Image: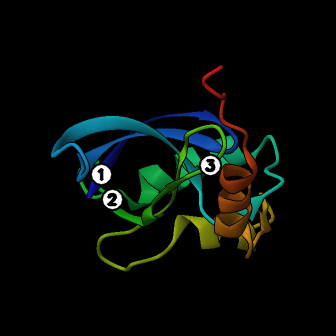
Amino acid sequence: MCEVVRVTRPDTFLLRTFVPSVLQKLCVYATPLATINHTKECQQAMLDWIELHSDNGKLLLDSQEWWRDSYGRLLTDLLDMQTKESMCDYLVEKGYCEYNANHVYDCLSVLLNSQEPSDV
């Protein structure tokens, strides 16, 4: 379960949730999972979807093993607690962004190809 604090960009939102790795509730930035090429209108669409589907401000959080993108945002989908409707599916269906089946792979690829500084 999570609460959305704010939507900051068409592809970024801030949420408050329990983070297992640190065993406490934290605020983390997130991006919609399996999406790409977000339109400017996507930000308002996310706000509208969250307002309509949240249950007293709460939504279900579906993250992929707590994977993060190259900006450190959590790859996640938000789900309606009652109907299990997906925010990412809604955004793609309505044309606010495109489906990206390789989102997790792309993020992993960036991580594996990144250079770490050497101890020289």
Q: Is residue 93 left or right of residue 1?
A: right
Quarter-of-image position of residue 40: top right
Mark 3 or mark 1, whichever is nearer to me: 3
Residue 34 in sight in this render: no
Of residues 100 and 60, which is closer to you in this image?
100
Residue labelled with disc 1: 2
Which disc number belongs to residue 59?
Answer: 2
- Amino acid type, mark 3: Asp
In three-dimensional space, the C-alpha distance between marks 2 and 1, rounded to whole angstroms, equals: 5 Å
> Residue lying farthest left?
23
The residue that label 3 is drawn on is: 69
For the residues labelled 3 and 2, the Cα–Cα distance comes to: 22 Å
Q: Earlier in the sequence, mark 2 or mark 1?
A: 1
C-alpha distance separating marks 3 and 1: 19 Å
Amino acid found under the numbered disc labelled 1: Cys
Task: Name which residue lies at 28% across and 46% down.
Answer: 17
Q: Helix, strand, or loop for circle 3?
A: loop
Residue 29 in the image: x percent, y percent?
49, 38
Residue type, mark 2 in image: Leu
Work out whether mark 3 precedes mark 1 in sequence or the reverse, and give the earlier one.
1
Q: Residue at x 76, y 71 (%)?
A: 99
